[in-house]
Amino acid sequence: MQSERPNASSWILHHYPQSPVAQKIRFLLSLCDRPWWSVEIPRIPPKPLLMPLTANYRRTPVLQIGADVYCDSQNIACALAESGCAEAVFGGQAPGRVLAFAAWVEQTLFALSVRVVITEALETAPPEFVQDRGDLYFGPGWSAESLRKDQPTVALELHGQLAQLESMLATSPFLGGDRANLADAAAGSVVWFLAGRWSQGDACLAAFPRLLAMVAELEANNLPACGELSGEEALMIASQAQSESPMQLSAWAQALEYRLGSQVAVRPAGDSSDPDVIGQLRALTDQRISLDHWDPRVGDVVVHLPLPGYRVWSR
Ligand SMILES: N[C@@H](CCC(=O)N[C@@H](CS)C(=O)NCC(=O)O)C(=O)O
């Protein structure tokens, strides 16, 4: 346990317990074995103590290190690696290989899992939650009827995708090899989600003992947060810190006429209800989009998003 209070270099995770994508990062933080602080945020907007930090990015989780705000779990994984945990995050493998695998997990396995869980929750979850998640994951215009119609075939495909993971574990206890890395945290968080939130989760997962054993190892290694912070405290830490993240523009971005300091809007690629994240371009590389953002509650902060999976428009 860490007794002192967090400072500008502490890892602060903005999340809520039920979030599977946050669970991916909680698994990863445990692998990093370094202290982290927790701020619990609401499950649906408004998120008034998060928005000043993220320039409107609303998804979960978000990692704050002082006045640097890392959105999206892939980007958070890279930030943890850059902060001295590359070995834990990538396990000595090429980062691109591990990140590409984790992206496949999100786009395929997580997408199917969210569908089966939300479809089942159509009758039971609060209507505003269902509407919010439907718009977010399936795009405006989604219908409960087509979700219900597709449920068996989506559940069938999910089983097939999980079987691929199971086969990857035939020769090593972890997807990362002899020890767990981001690949395991990503896949493990989906298994955690299915087991905890889908009435057929256990039945579906029963065919995959190696996968279940891998997740049990991750859970046994759990490193809880060293303390809870309020949203206000996190804003205060940001307001007292200063980002030193570099200004940089890749040659390719320059050739495409992106300019540092210009105003841009950023959104996840694909059809979703995510709002635009707007700021002044501070960095644009193959890995990352960084925006200067100012808010009266925090002053100047830098919001970082990943480039893979996101779109950037000049405004
Ligand atoms: N690509 C994002 C996806 C994050 C995501 O969809 N998280 C869910 C929670 S598991 C979410 O944001 N739900 C809506 C919310 O929390 O407001 C990432 O990797 O972080």
Image (cartoon, rainbow, N blue to C red):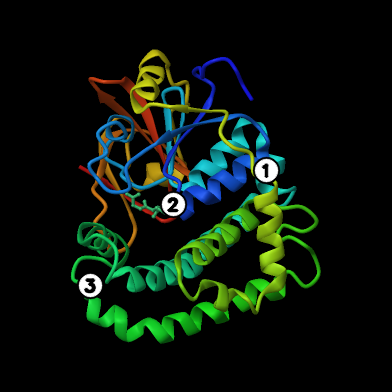
Badge number at residue 86: none
**Mark 3 highlights which residue?**
142
Q: Earlier in the sequence, mark 2 or mark 3?
A: 2
Q: Which of marks 2 and 1 is nearer the N terminus?
A: 2
Question: Which residue shows up at 57% across the image and 57% down it?
Answer: 186
Percent x, y for residue 116?
Answer: 40, 73
**Mark 1 highlights which residue?**
31
Q: Can residue 287 be seen in this view?
A: no
Q: SS at mark 2?
A: loop
Q: The disc labelled 3 sits on which kind of residue?
A: Trp
- Residue 153 in the figure: left or right of residue 103: left
Please tell me how crowded label 2 is: few (under 14), some (14-19), or many (20+) other residues with Cα within 10 Å: some
Q: Which of marks 2 and 3 is in front?
A: 2
- For label 2, being within 8 Å of ligand 1 is answered yes
**Is residue 127 placed above or below 289 in the rendered structure?**
below
In the image shown, does 82 or 115 lie closer to the viewer?
115
Do tag 1 and tag 3 residues touch (Cβ < 8 Å)? no
Percent x, y for residue 309?
Answer: 42, 56
Percent x, y for residue 209?
Answer: 70, 72
Q: How many labels does the image show?
A: 3
**Mark 2 highlights which residue?**
19
Residue 304 image-quadrant placement: top left
Q: Nearer the viewer, mark 2 or mark 1?
A: 2
Question: Which residue shows up at 63% across the image and 76% down it?
Answer: 206
Percent x, y for residue 222?
Answer: 64, 44
Please tell me how crowded label 3 is: few (under 14), some (14-19), or many (20+) other residues with Cα within 10 Å: some
Q: Is residue 184 visible?
A: yes
